[in-house]
Image (tube, rainbow, N blue to C red):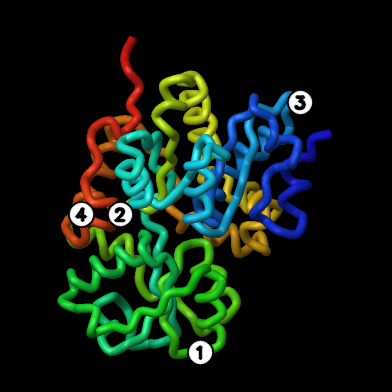
């Protein structure tokens, strides 16, 4: 018998499949996301699917982007919600067999610290910063903003942790520590330690440079899957859009689901974090414009950050007119 979504996610680890029985069914569409904003945007979708007698989707939530991308490349996951630059890397590695169907989160990164001297990236000279995402969005965003503020890697010591919870732990132990954290972990850290503050929204800092929008997460599918299953792609997009709308317009109810899923432990914290997560579902030409500009900014900084080359037009899934 299939287990319900909530039954699985309220069990020990929140990186497990919906259930062993669901995951093994070839008829189901498998969706993988990361513990954080991308999964928050899916909670309405997950909840509705759990209520269906005949389920069409299974969901996997993981903490590491590398692990999720591996499952996507192996075919265990059909739709993967991953960092934007990783989508470009996979596109280049597969010779164009990866397409982006939507942008699921815009900027979610914040500077978090109790240091009263730090109000922006410009104040980081001579400081040590703890963050996650080596070789991923946090590293490239931070490097871009350091350069934009006239700072180099020699001016700031950056120590990378494997998970956001490790950064939160460092901030709780050392009141002088500075962290770069995504939502909802930034809000969680401030709730755990009242001396901490969100000293800067890195999305606003990026936007102030005039170099397009900061894009954090996108949803990818293999081109061969999209070509063989256009109806499933469109159905996923409709469900995802509805879920994002539910989360953004019903924050209190969404917060309860976020807690049930094990993404955040307490509903009041989730309720405060959700509006800061920039959860969205942007597709078609608007997606292409925003994402291509962001990838160009990363390419200028370090071509390898996006896999060595800018993706072609076929990277962007745009429904063809009949």
The alpha-carbon separation of the residues under discs 1 and 2 comes to: 29 Å
Disc 1 and disc 4 in contact, CB within 8 angstroms: no
- In the rendered image, residue 270, in percent from the top left (x then y), is placed at 59, 59
User: Are dots 1 and 2 in contact, CB under 8 Å?
Assistant: no
Quarter residue 133 falls in: bottom left
Which mark is first along the chain, 2 or 1? 1
Q: Mark 4 points at which residue?
A: 299
Q: In this view, does 91 lie to the left or right of 169?
A: left
- Real-space Cα distance between discs 4 and 2? 14 Å
Task: Say if 49 sits above or below 40 in the image.
Answer: above
Q: Helix, strand or loop at disc 1?
A: loop
Quadrant for the C terminus in the image: top left
Q: Mark 2 points at which residue?
A: 214
Asked if residue 153 can be seen in this view, the reply is yes
Q: In which quarter of the image is residue 194?
A: bottom right
Q: How far apart are marks 2 and 3 (CA)?
A: 39 Å
Q: Between disc 3 and disc 1, whose residue precedes? A: 3
Q: Mark 1 points at which residue?
A: 174
Foreground mark, 1 or 4?
A: 4
User: Which residue occupies the foreground of this view, 300 or 261?
Assistant: 300
The relative height of residue 319 versus residue 237 in the rendered view (above or below) is above
- For marks 4 and 2 on the same chain, the one whose residue lies earlier in the sequence: 2
The dot on residue 53 is 3
Query: How far apart are labels 3 and 1 at the CA level?
Result: 50 Å
């Amino acid at each position: 018998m299939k287990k319900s979504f909530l039954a699985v996610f309220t069990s020990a680890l929140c990186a497990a499949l919906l259930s062993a029985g669901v995951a093994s069914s070839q008829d189901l569409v498998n969706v993988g996301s990361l513990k954080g904003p991308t999964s928050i945007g899916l909670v309405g979708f997950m909840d509705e699917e759990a209520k269906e007698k005949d389920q069409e989707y299974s969901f996997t939530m993981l903490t590491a982007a590398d692990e999720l991308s591996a499952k996507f490349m192996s075919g265990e996951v059909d739709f993967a919600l991953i960092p934007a630059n990783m989508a470009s890397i996979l596109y280049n590695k597969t010779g164009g067999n990866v397409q982006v169907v939507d942008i699921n989160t815009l900027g979610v990164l914040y500077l978090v610290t109790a240091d009263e001297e730090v109000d922006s990236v410009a104040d980081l000279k001579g400081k040590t910063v703890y963050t996650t995402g080596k070789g991923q969005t946090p590293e490239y965003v931070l490097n871009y903003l350091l350069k934009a503020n006239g700072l180099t890697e020699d001016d700031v010591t950056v120590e990378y942790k494997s998970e956001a919870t490790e950064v939160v732990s460092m901030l709780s132990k050392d009141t002088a520590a500075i962290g770069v954290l995504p939502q909802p972990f930034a809000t969680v850290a401030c709730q755990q330690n009242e001396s901490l503050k969100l000293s800067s929204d890195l999305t606003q800092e990026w936007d102030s440079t005039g170099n397009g929008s900061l894009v954090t997460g996108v949803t990818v599918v293999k081109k061969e899957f999209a070509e063989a299953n256009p109806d499933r792609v469109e159905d996923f997009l409709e469900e995802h859009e509805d879920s994002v709308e539910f989360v953004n317009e019903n924050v209190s109810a969404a917060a309860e689901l976020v807690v049930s899923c094990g993404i955040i432990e307490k509903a009041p914290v989730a309720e405060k974090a959700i509006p800061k997560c920039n959860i969205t579902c942007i597709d078609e030409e608007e997606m292409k414009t925003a994402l291509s500009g962001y990838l160009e900014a990363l390419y200028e900084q370090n071509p390898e950050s996006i896999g060595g080359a800018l993706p072609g037009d076929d990277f962007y899934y745009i429904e063809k007119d009949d």
